[in-house]
Image: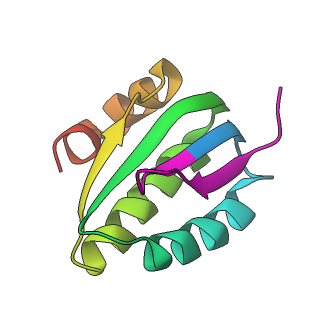
Amino acid sequence: MSESAVRLGDAGELLISGVLDYRSGPSLRKQGLALIKSSPGTALVLDCSAVEKSSSVGLALLLAFIRDGQGLGKTVSVRALPEDMREIAEVSGVTEILLHP
């Protein structure tokens, strides 16, 4: 498994990768917030296609990133939500927020 990371892609999307858990969550949260604040444009895509594994921490990160982006007046969408995150979202009752902001 690769190291967790969050970075801005060429098209301004937030690229989230690796394992999202209690070890990686706090640093990804700080990095993601800074990147969202610095991202140009009014739309933000949270790209999860490189997420290898996630606990509920990953879901909390996505919800925080959505809130951050919307707080800055950006429209936010989620791309390629992994199955494990989708299952946690369904149990938690937040699927609608993630897939239809």
Q: Position of residue 20 (x, y in %)?
A: 67, 42
Q: Position of residue 31 (x, y in %)?
A: 65, 69
Nearer to us in this view, 60 or 45: 45
Q: Quadrant of the N terminus?
A: top right
In the figure, 31 relative to 93: above or below? below
Tell me if 27 is positioned left or right of 2 in this view: left
Count of labels in the image: 0
Q: Position of residue 24 (x, y in %)?
A: 76, 53
Tell me if 40 is positioned left or right of 77 in this view: right
- Asked if residue 99 lies in the magenta stretch, the reply is no
Can you name the residue that lies furthest to the top here? 83
In the figure, 65 relative to 87: above or below? below
Q: Position of residue 82 (x, y in %)?
A: 48, 24
Residue at position x 50%, y 36% in the image:
48
Q: Quadrant of residue 30?
A: bottom right
Residue at position x 70%, y 65% in the image:
26
Q: Quadrant of residue 43?
A: bottom left
Instruction: Name the magenta segment's main secondary structure.
Output: loop
Residue at position x 61%, y 56% in the image:
7
- The segment highlighted magenta reads 1-15
Nearer to us in this view, 80 or 98: 80
Nearer to us in this view, 84 or 30: 30
Nearer to us in this view, 55 or 19: 19
- Asked if residue 5 lies in the magenta stretch, the reply is yes
| Color encoding of the figure | rainbow
Residue at position x 49%, y 51% in the image:
10
